[in-house]
Image (tube, grey):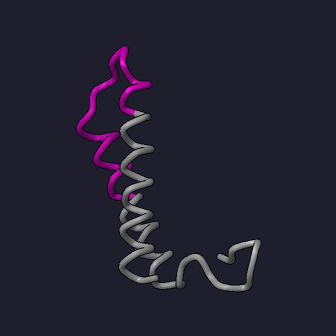
Amino acid sequence: MENPNDEKALFTWGAFILLLLILTVIDIVFRVFVKPNKKMWLLQLAFLIVVCVTSLIVKVTFG
């Protein structure tokens, strides 16, 4: 994964695979433990925030 502005990679392959694994686990946890309800949009927003924070943590740690 490269930044279009320069040739420097945004994530290393190891960090990218780790990010995919973490997000897969988080998605499974959301689907298993959260029962369908009328406020699903709120849960989707929470998932997006978790994805953003996790991406930043992986980027800072492995970047």
In this rendering, position of residue 32 left or right of residue 16: left
Q: Is residue 26 above or below residue 60?
A: above
Residue 50, given in percent of the width and then of the height, sits at 36, 50
Q: Is residue 41 above or below residue 59?
A: above
Which residue is rendered at x = 39% and y = 43% of the image?
A: 47
Residue 61, given in percent of the width and then of the height, sits at 36, 79
Quadrant position of residue 7: bottom right
Q: Residue furthest toward the front?
A: 5
Which residue is rendered at x = 36% and y = 38% of the image?
A: 46
How many marks the image carries: the answer is 0
Magenta stretch encompasses residue 32: yes
In this rendering, position of residue 18 left or right of residue 32: right
Q: Is residue 46 above or below residue 51?
A: above
Q: Nearer the viewer, residue 52 or 26?
A: 52
Locate the N terminus and report the quarter of the image it occupies. bottom right
Magenta stretch encompasses residue 21: no
Q: Residue furthest toward the left?
A: 33
Residue 51, given in percent of the width and then of the height, sits at 42, 53
Quadrant position of residue 4: bottom right
In this rendering, position of residue 49 left or right of residue 4: left
Judged by its main secondary structure, the magenta piece is: helix
- Give, as a single range, the part of the protein colored magenta: 24-43
Which residue is rendered at x = 40% and y = 58% of the image?
A: 24
Residue 59, given in percent of the width and then of the height, sits at 45, 73
Q: Residue furthest toward the top?
A: 38
Quadrant position of residue 42: top left
